[in-house]
């Protein structure tokens, strides 16, 4: 892994992980330079988000999980916890400044995917309509999951919202043939061939959260499922293109990009996030800006978060 000092020329030809406030990076980027943006900003819950951290070391003999390219890894729970604050005095103002810049940096055929909590989504939709124009709104995707407690006093809220806005709704990337297929609910009604092929998803995406003990788990709070990001990356960007996530957390967007032959620029203001990302994405040899990762040796092996 190589490391360059913060702010030393922002190239877009490599994979990059940057420790910085997103606004500082965005203001430094050329206009019309990014084909795909996914962001999952803090949801303004007023709480501190925290999670048990864990490290995974390469261990071909005693590994309890399989990682990238079928390598075996062993999980070690870390006494430290990952966390970040999720409370803002002027939440919409904070988002607006960044969304205006994101609109500017999108290429003419570029798209923004904006992931948000159902309690804030309506305010954000109105703001996005103002910044992009109402006619550039394409989809409200509902990510539906089924995990955790179930209220007995109301319908349990088990979804997030992902808005898709194009810079130009008459010209955008939508690789229909690269959409993953899902099973029919009633396969016997559609015939053998169709049932085997499966169907394309609608704007409601059923996907479990990242399982607590799954191999995807980094221990970073609010980590999103790789499957959601892989679908977005495959369908809305072309091979070799750059994907930007400036609230990158555990680096799920970068993982989806690298696994699918795209490049990534990941930004987060939390030192714990960039450390998690650097380890998770070490296989894609990212350039690190504004920080360095200490090579940890556990049982004589290099620590890797997957
Ligand atoms: C909801 S999490 C993103 C989770 C991510 N999608 C994943 O799959 O792991 C939001 C992230 O935004 C980061 N963040 C908050 N304010 C920021 C800012 N001003 N600039 C850059 N990152 C910021 C937080 O540190 C946190 O990691």
Image (spheres, rainbow, N blue to C red):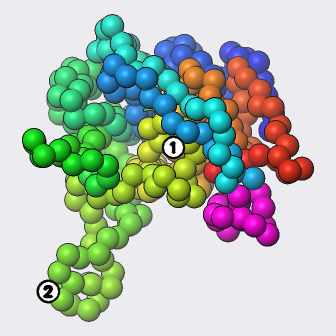
For disc 2, does the CB lie below 8 Å from ligand 1? no
Does the magenta-highlighted stretch encompass residue 68?
yes
Is the residue 268 above or below the residue 278 in the image? above
* Residue 136 appears in the figure: no
Residue at 23 percent across and 76 percent down: it is: 184
- Judge the density around disc 2: few (<14), some (14-19), many (≥20) Cα neighbours within 10 Å: few
Name the residue that disc number 2 marks: 189
**Which residue is more in the foreground, 120 or 150?**
150
Give the secondary structure at mark 2: helix
Q: Quadrant of residue 292?
A: top right
Q: Are marks 2 and 1 in contact (CB under 8 Å)?
A: no
Is the residue 272 above or below the residue 300 in the image? above
Does the magenta-highlighted stretch encompass residue 166?
no
Q: Residue furthest right?
A: 300
The magenta span reads 58-74
**Which residue is more in the foreground, 130 or 273?**
273
Image quadrant for the N terminus? top right
Q: Quadrant of residue 89?
A: top left
For disc 1, does the CB lie below 8 Å from ligand 1? yes
Name the residue that disc number 1 marks: 253
Residue at 83 percent across and 46 percent down: it is: 298
In the drawing, does residue 119 fall left or right of residue 83? left
Where residue 268 appears, x then y in whole percent?
55, 25
Residue at 77 percent across and 46 percent down: it is: 303
């Amino acid at each position: 892994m190589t490391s360059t000092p913060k702010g030393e020329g922002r190239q877009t030809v490599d994979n990059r992980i940057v420790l910085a406030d997103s606004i500082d990076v965005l203001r430094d980027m050329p206009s019309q330079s990014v084909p795909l943006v996914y962001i999952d900003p803090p949801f303004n819950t007023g709480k501190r988000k925290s999670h048990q951290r864990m490290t995974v070391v390469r261990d071909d003999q005693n590994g309890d999980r399989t990682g990238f390219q079928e390598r075996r890894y062993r999980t070690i729970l870390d006494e430290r916890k990952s966390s970040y604050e999720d409370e803002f005095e002027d939440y919409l103002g904070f988002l607006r400044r960044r969304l205006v810049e994101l609109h500017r940096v999108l290429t003419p055929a570029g798209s923004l995917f904006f992931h948000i909590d159902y309690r804030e989504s309506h305010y954000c939709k109105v703001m996005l309509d103002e910044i992009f124009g109402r006619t550039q709104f394409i989809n409200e995707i509902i990510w539906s999951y089924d995990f955790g407690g179930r209220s007995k006093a109301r319908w349990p809220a088990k979804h997030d919202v992902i808005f898709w806005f194009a810079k130009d709704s008459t010209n955008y990337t939508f690789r229909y043939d690269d959409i993953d297929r899902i099973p029919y609910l009633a396969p016997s009604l559609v015939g053998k061939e169709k049932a085997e092929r499966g169907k394309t998803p609608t704007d409601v995406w059923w996907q479990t959260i990242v399982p607590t003990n799954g191999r995807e788990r980094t221990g970073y709070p609010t980590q999103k499922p790789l499957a959601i990001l892989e679908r977005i990356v495959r369908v809305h960007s072309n091979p070799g293109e750059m994907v930007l996530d400036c609230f990158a957390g555990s680096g799920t967007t970068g993982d989806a990009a690298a696994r699918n032959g795209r490049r990534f620029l990941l930004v987060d203001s939390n030192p714990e996030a960039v450390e998690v990302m650097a380890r998770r994405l070490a296989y894609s040899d990212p350039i690190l800006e504004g920080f360095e990762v200490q090579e940890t040796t556990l049982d004589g092996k290099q620590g890797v978060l997957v």
